[in-house]
Image (spheres, grey):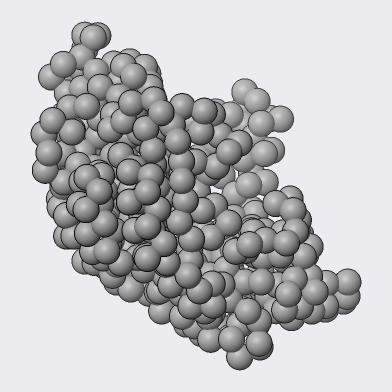
Amino acid sequence: MNDYQFIKEQDPELYATLVGEEEREQNGVELIPSENYVSRAVREANGSIFTNKYSEGYPGRRYYGGQEFTDMMETIAIERAKKLFKAKYANVQPLGGANANVAMYFALMEPGDTVLGMDLSHGGHLTHGHPTTAINKVFNFVRYKMKNVETGEIDYDELRAVALREKPKIILAGFSAYSRELDYGKFAEIAKEVGAYTVADMAHIAGLIAGGVAKNPFDFGFDVITTTTHKTLRGPRGGMILVRENEDLAKKINKAVFPGMQGGPHMHIIAGKAVAFGEALTPAFKIYVEQILKNAKAMEGVFKKEGIRLLGGGTDNHLLLADVYGSLGVTGQEAETVLDEVGITLNKNMIADEPRSALDPSGIRFGTPAMTTRNMKEKEAIRLAEIMIETMKNKDNTAIKTVLREEVKNMCQTFPVPERFV
């Protein structure tokens, strides 16, 4: 615990929370698809000297002095991001994925314009126009859904019909809880027909795209990609906006981020992004993302064998969504709680056309990015899936849960969180 020696001496109360979280992450398996472990190098950058520096503006065009090294560092992050995703322009300043999406909306649209995005209950994200979000008061959001929730097939005929009727300014491809690969070509075709921008929110699958195991929307003519920089990309918590080739669009996005949405960027986080992008450009990263998919398929096989319904019928990416209430009579909240008890962390999640409440839905969402970072492979993925199912079936059996908790802890000690990825 030498990482926190100054906090230990100065603030024992806070130090206890850091120690507790470190132990929780080391001794439990993280299966939340949007979470991952970063390298020690990324953590060093996050806690670096750059946290002291205000750098409003962009490299070469700042509003404060003393920018020699911040300009160098942010440029490194930008160039690496462009190389990773085959983009001509990149803005690495958004503080998160939501910030990136909102800035993108203001760059591409005027208030009252329409966005066509995925319905939240079918896998979309809050920032894709859920009625509870503030952005929903500014723009008009219309939605598309899956045609068949058992296969995950998007209803592209409905998508086209809605687009022709509503004339959206943006057609948004992307998701938060969807386990199949989208047909970006169809999105682009429909967008061209109605004169809309094509935007992909790839927050969940950015690492898979960077590593070449998922399709890149830019290859199908998409205009813009928004993303987080954590999740499968295995960087610090933050956001990013990429533009394929349109310089005018890139300028609009830069203005929407700063000064439109944000003031001074978090330069220490941008430094962490640069480190993570460098890691993602290595051959080791491609091997890592390939294993993410193998592990997800291994878990899919166990759930199918046990007759547990998987939304979309399975997975093509890093995550799975299971209807545990319909299959086991266990609610999503119950499953989240009881799995925490045995050292497995995931999240409750609504399923398509959810009959229950968002706070206690029918489903759970889980994925393999973090466990794969620990170098766990198919054997461990299969066993973890078995433990999950056994735990849910015996949610009130303390003796069984105690034994399973010890097994999970032993597995974690066998596969510790690594400090280096390259």
Residue closer to the observer: 372 or 245: 245
Q: Quadrant of the N terminus?
A: top right
Q: Residue at x 52, y 28 (%)?
A: 137
Q: Residue at x 22, y 31 (%)?
A: 74
Residue that lies at the very extreme toward the bottom in this rendered image: 305
Name the side, left or right, on which 295 lies relative to 362.
Answer: left
Residue closer to the observer: 104 or 140: 140
Instruction: Using the rendered view, name the quadrant where residue 81 is placed.
Output: top left
In the displayed structure, 311 sits above or below 171; it is: below
The picture places residue 221, in percent across and down from the top left corner, at 16, 54
Name the side, left or right, on which 43 lies relative to 329.
Answer: left
Tell me, yes or no, if residue 284 can be seen here: no
Q: Residue at x 51, y 33 (%)?
A: 136
Residue closer to the observer: 152 or 380: 152
Instruction: Using the rendered view, name the quadrant where residue 232 is placed.
Output: bottom left
Name the side, left or right, on which 360 lies relative to 164.
Answer: right
In the displayed structure, 381 sits above or below 61; it is: below
